[in-house]
Amino acid sequence: MKKVAEKDTKPERVALLEGRIREIYAEYRHLLPAEYKWEDESSRWTELVYCIFAELTHHSYRDARRLANDLADLNLLEVEDLARIPIMDNGTINPDNSRVKTITDILKTNSVTDDDIKKSLSAICKVAQAIEENYDGKIQKFLRKYGHEIVDDFDSHVSFYEVSKGTQSRILVKWIQNTLCMPLAFSNVYTARFCERKGANYQELAEAADNLGINGAMLDDLLEVYIVDIEGKQT
């Protein structure tokens, strides 16, 4: 399916897709594997926060991961909220911000030093601002951008004469999904058929998935199960 510019998306179609995907997820998710890497796209952001803690604090990697997960469980790592925290002239965050105070108290309770807290939170908030400003607060959009570049670059150098260009692209998307866990969609014809049934395009489906925080690879599999089921019932 041809990708379209973001301006060609219609909010009402995106909203309808979100609702339908929620319904399909509730009905068919149990038919898929129990676990998907980054099924919830927000976990990619938590992983980045963990990496910051792991490098900028004197805690073990295991403790750094626990801190990141605990803060995420408390809903203290929302990109939009962190992006709004002011950065002062000296490059550090405003210590009087209520969210900063809460996170600081938690980190101090876990024996993170004041200097490490200042460095870590400043880094986290600066990255959050960049993601919010450039990728609508969704880190998967950053990854998807470069995932598509990989597909396009590979497509430009390799040609499977035995198959169509669309089939070749789906093969590459599936490979990148599986090997790099990239948040790409449309690795199978069923996802395309779903969009055709809904009168939607790639960008609208991707936007709906982003709004729901659902992983593109899992969405492909979910829509395959759904389409096979409903088309089987119609025969």
Image (cartoon, rainbow, N blue to C red):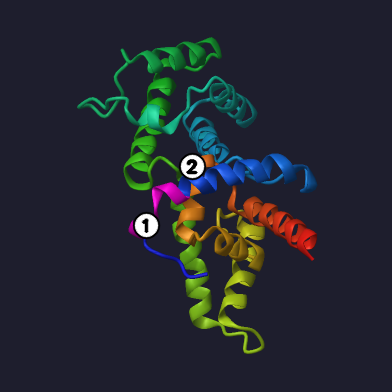
- Where does label 1 land, which residue? 6
Sort mark 2 into few (<14), some (14-19) or many (20+) by Cα contacts within 10 Å: some
Task: Specify whether residue 11 is in view.
Answer: yes
User: What x and y, as percent, mark residue 75?
Assistant: 51, 23
Residue at position x 26%, y 29% in the image: 91
Q: At 45% across and 43% down in the image, what residue appears? A: 138
Q: Nearer the viewer, residue 55 or 171?
A: 171
Q: Is residue 214 visible?
A: no
The location of residue 40, given as percent across then percent down, is 60, 40
Q: Give the magenta range.
A: 7-13
Q: Amino acid at mark 1?
A: Glu
Q: Answer left or right for 72 relative to 35.
A: left
- Camera-side residue of 91 and 25: 25
Q: Earlier in the sequence, mark 2 or mark 1?
A: 1
Expressed as whole percent of the image width and height from the top left, the position of residue 180 reads: 61, 57
Residue 61 horizontal side relative to residue 79, left or right = right
List the residue tagged with mark 2.
211
Distance CA(mark 2)–CA(mark 1): 14 Å
The amino acid at mark 2 is Asn
